[in-house]
Image: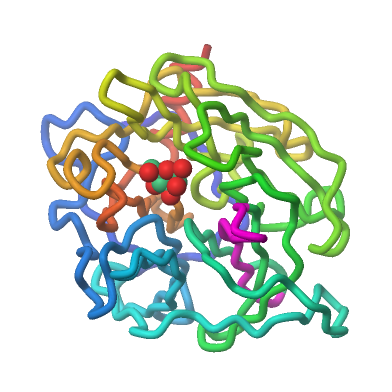
Amino acid sequence: MSNMHIKIIGCKSLKNIPFEKKPIGCKDVIWRYSGNPIIKRDSLKCSNSIFNSAVVPYGDRFAGVFRVDDRRRNMQLHAGFSDDAVNWILDEKKIEWLNGINTVGDDKTSEINPWQYGYDPRVVFIEDRWWVTWCNGLDWKPTIGVGYTFDFKKFVQCENAFLPFNRNGVLFPRKIQNKYVMLSRPSDSGHTPFGDIFISQSPDMKYWGEHRHVMSPKHPWESKKIGAGPIPIETSEGWLCIYHGVLESCNGFVYSFGAAILDIDEPWKVKYRCSEYLLSPQEIYECAGDVPNVTFPCAALCDPDTGRLAIYYGCADTHVGLAFAQVDELVEHIIKKNF
Ligand code: BMA
């Protein structure tokens, strides 16, 4: 157990966060839910697979945006609700985005590229609404789509944040120095054999600039590429960022989780970064599926009172898994293993 006193800032109490104690004898700082995977590939009539997905607290319940690849293998986003954040009811129908209301405080409509595909969503509450970012097809090339919802029923799409090619757009949960801030990972048209995390800033969620480099691959487990994962969590030590890192083996890519702590006011500055992976594909549902050896975190729930963390991750591009950690233990571990 941890000796550090890490304060979690800006998260509301979440008494009903799903959680299991660390199994006796477990040496890891992140451990899996015993009932994994929580969402199976065929949970919907239309689904080939349901994986890299985002969940948030919503009133007394939970809501989310889920990556559903359908049986034509179109990549779609579906909304869903849950009472306990473990058992989910997903909408059979994909999200139909209302196109064209632009941005915060600006209700003018504009033409946005018609919907082509969407995948790997992230969701965060900022100020008055739930913002959704995802990997969005622009002329069939991936970039970062941006939209919002107030109720997870009606969704409005805004302008794309960037030009292709880009993936893993992850917003911070509040403005920093009066700007919205987003992490992203410039990429290519295919299965990108490189990738660094960058940060961009915006006064209005529409125009993005003041780009800064955050971090590049460093250690063997992440040597091919890295990309931001869940929404960063504000702590007294800095922004806790869980990310994915990819190793290229003789049998293809291996996706693991890592974590870093970024400076609160200048989050392009890395304070600490864990040299070891925190969870890597080892269970059968992570090693076997449409894309073997993938653990891909996209969301985390956090209870500031207990420091409990519930991390949602895609398993082998097939199912959704759940894993747990204690924020103080995780932060302490990142600091200890920093180099
Ligand atoms: C990445 C994205 C993810 C996927 C991963 C492994 O490039 O497409 O959606 O989980 O590859 O296939």
Residue drawn at (62%, 39%) of the image: 185
Q: Is residue 61 left or right of residue 163?
A: left
Using the image, determine if residue 291 lies above or below residue 86.
Answer: above
Residue drawn at (86%, 54%) of the image: 178
Stretch of the chain drawn in magenta? 128-142
Residue drawn at (82%, 63%) of the image: 206
In this rendered view, identify the residue nearer to me: 248 or 280: 248
**Picture quarter containing residue 7?**
top right
Magenta residue check for 138: yes
- Image location (x, y in percent) of residue 46: 28, 77
Magenta residue check for 259: no
Q: Is residue 13 left or right of residue 215?
A: left
| Number of marks present in the image shown | 0
In this rendered view, identify the residue nearer to me: 228 or 166: 166
Using the image, determine if residue 39 lies above or below residue 238.
Answer: below
User: Which quarter is ligand 1 in?
Assistant: top left
**Picture quarter containing residue 108?**
bottom right
Residue drawn at (21%, 53%) of the image: 20
In terms of secondary structure, what is the magenta stretch mainly?
strand
Q: Is residue 53 visible?
A: yes
- Image location (x, y in percent) of residue 28: 26, 30
Using the image, determine if residue 296 lies above or below residue 222.
Answer: below
